[in-house]
Image (cartoon, rainbow, N blue to C red):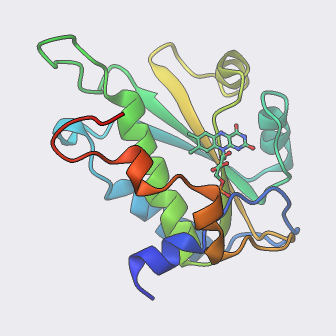
């Protein structure tokens, strides 16, 4: 299966079975995050793997969650992230953490593990519950597990995504 075909099989899973994620699969998902590119190769990501009932309950106190087998809290370490774009000192930590999250989400799909990317969480609760110091900013939560809902079809993109003509412009931004 080529990349595009595989990526089209991914969808946001919002109902999971009780099946745990095999250790080898979880390790491969984390390895995909490890090899992701980051600005200046600074690798500011800090990933908290949460599989315990107590840990998942802490996440559920900060966000609407869907009973996954595991959740990865992907944080950016702002002491490490690149912030030296000379024009505006942009902090690339959020970008880096999101590239890492994307790599892990797609490796999960390649291993037939389902996922949901969550940003709508209360960062203060996550920081408090997981004792995160000021420089460790939770950026994304990636739920992982085996979906027990009907998978979304790979044919849905014509209806569910904008056509390229609305988002891609050659040489000059069009209207
Ligand atoms: C950056 C980002 C943040 C998201 N945050 C949430 C969230 O907090 N809760 C949720 O249920 N889904 C969340 N999603 C899932 C999106 O709603 C979903 O990817 C989008 O509707 C497209 O559907 P699909 O993933 O099934 O193709 C998020 C996705 C992304 C990429």
| Residue drawn 31% across the image and 20% down it | 91
Quadrant hosting residue 84: top left
Residue 33 position within the rendered picture, expressed as x and y whole percent measured from the top left: 41, 55
Position of 85 with respect to 124 (left or right) is left
* Nearer the observer, 120 or 4: 4
Residue 87, placed above or below residue 2: above
The quadrant of the picture occupied by the C terminus is: top left
Residue 161 position within the rendered picture, expressed as x and y whole percent measured from the top left: 57, 55
| Residue drawn 53% across the image and 31% down it | 139
The quadrant of the picture occupied by the N terminus is: bottom left
* Nearer the observer, 85 or 47: 85
Position of 133 with respect to 146 (left or right) is left
Farthest left residue in view: 86
Residue 74 position within the rendered picture, expressed as x and y whole percent measured from the top left: 53, 40
Specify whether residue 99 is in view: no
* Nearer the observer, 58 or 16: 16
| Residue drawn 72% across the image and 55% down it | 70
Residue 110, placed above or below residue 173: below
Residue 94, placed above or below residue 143: above
| Residue drawn 48% across the image and 23% down it | 136
Residue 9 position within the rendered picture, expressed as x and y whole percent measured from the top left: 60, 74
């Amino acid at each position: 299966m080529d990349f595009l075909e595989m990526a089209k099989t991914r969808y946001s899973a919002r109902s999971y079975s009780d099946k745990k994620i095999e250790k080898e699969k979880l390790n491969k998902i984390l390895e995909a995050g490890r090899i992701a590119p980051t600005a200046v190769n600074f690798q500011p990501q800090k990933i908290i793997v949460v599989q315990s009932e107590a840990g998942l309950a802490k996440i559920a106190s900060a966000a609407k969650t869907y009973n996954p087998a595991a959740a990865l809290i992907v944080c950016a370490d702002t002491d490490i992230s690149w912030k030296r774009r000379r024009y505006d000192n942009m902090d690339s930590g959020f970008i880096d953490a999101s590239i890492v999250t994307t790599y892990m989400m797609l490796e999960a799909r390649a291993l037939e593990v389902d996922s949901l990317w969550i940003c709508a969480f209360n960062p203060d609760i996550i920081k408090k519950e997981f004792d995160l110091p000021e420089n460790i900013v939770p950026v994304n939560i990636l739920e992982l597990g085996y979906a027990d809902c009907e998978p979304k079809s790979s044919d849905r993109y014509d209806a569910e995504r904008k056509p390229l003509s609305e988002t891609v412009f050659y040489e000059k931004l069009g209207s």
